[in-house]
Image: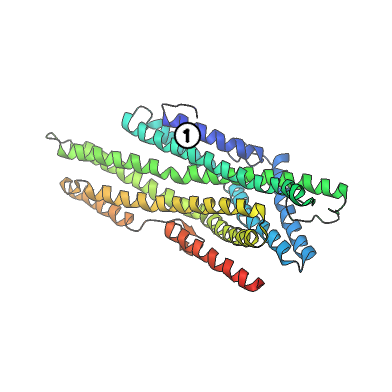
Amino acid sequence: MRSFTKSYEMYDYNLLFIRWMADFSGVDMLVDDYRFNYRTAICVATVLMGAINCTYSLAYFYPNYYKMCEVVVLLGILIQGTPKLYFGYIHREFYKLQYGRLRLLHYRYRDHEKLNAKLLLLMERIHVLSKLLSIVFIFGGLGYSIYPLYMYWAHHELVLMVTMQVPWIDADSYTGYTVTTAMQMVMIVIACTGLSASDTAILLFVANLSAYVEVFTDELNKLNAMLSAEDRDEEVIRCQVRKICSQHQDIIEYESDLDERYIVICFGLAIGAITTMTVSIFLAYMNSYIPGYALVVVGFFQLLEFCLLGTVLTVKNEEIIEAIYSTDWYLLAEPERRCFALMLHKSQNFTEMTIGGFAPLNLETFVAIMNRIYSYFMMLISFIE
């Protein structure tokens, strides 16, 4: 990893990494005057073909339940990928604006030694997690890629990377197998880069709430220093309180935007991951299905990432409450004290990221989802037996 001394430089580097993956898939929404291009068409066509081919394959393989389960795994990936593509496109101007504001936040404090160090550490951690997520998705893609090689080497059986039939193409013929394999390879590459880009973008966007909280806490510390000074300047104190109130309002709006933009995406991720992981564990247990092992790892890390991000929001909101309460607000004049009382009241009713509005996105929900996946897996075993 390249070495940077300013947090905004590390922010740009993170964004460059995300945009490279998004541009490869044709969904770089942050480019000026974004236009629908041939790579975007390939990405959209991949989603549409995946939905059509999965529907066709379910009817084609019926009543072979194991083959149908392999197709259901792909449906789980489509369920979580489609909302990310759709909402990323319709909210592209909003994301462009917010990413610009985040960069301005980092740039504004580039010469603040303490804050710059904290923000730089945050960006470095985000970058490491982004690379880890990319490796996880590559691992998932390799699980599908090595499956035909393993089956041919171990059983001398020619199988497709993805158990999915294409209408009007006979995969049992040499030409049909070649065409189907080429199409599936493109779909796997697009899926891995697209999902990796979207998840790392969400990571960068949500985790940067910590940057807002660090700046907010620093301003509260400055106010405390002003209040404890022997020669107090009431006008400067009033300006500082107004600045703090404005920053607090920005944090509230930022959190509300996060839940509003990602509520459906989180719901699709939860449903898709539960479906993919449950059926993958079942196939790996019953048939030693190699891609199933990789997909369980991918689904686990995806769910863990989102639930950790939701937990980060909760923890940071608790830090805001503690920071406000720990301020020497009782030394303020009456109008400024009322402002602090209002901030404290709003902080106690903070916005959380949710899964479609049904459940909070946190580690407790992650544990509950893991338990539910195990229950569904046992139900499938009982059904087969």
For this view, does 132 lie left or right of residue 190?
left
Q: Which residue corresponds to the image point at 58% horizontal and 66% vertical from the top-left?
A: 377
For the point 65% across and 48% down, the residue is 143
Identify the residue position indicated by label 1 in the image. Answer: 11
The image quadrant of residue 186 is top right
Q: Residue 326: x, y in percent?
A: 22, 48
Left or right: where 349 falls relative to 188: left
Task: Write the residue at 75% across / 63% down.
Answer: 58
- Residue 195 percent coordinates (x, y): 60, 47
Which amino acid, mark 1? Answer: Tyr
Measured as percent of width and height from the top left, residue 65 is found at 72, 67
- Residue neighbourhood size for the residue with mark 1, other residues' Cα within 10 Å, grouped as few (<14), some (14–19), many (≥20): many
Which of the two residues, 350 or 234, is positioned nearer the viewer here? 350
Q: Quadrant of residue 77?
A: bottom right
Closest to the observer, 155 or 209: 155
Res. 31 visible in picture: no
Asked if 125 appears above or below 62 in the picture, the reply is above
- Element type at mark 1: helix
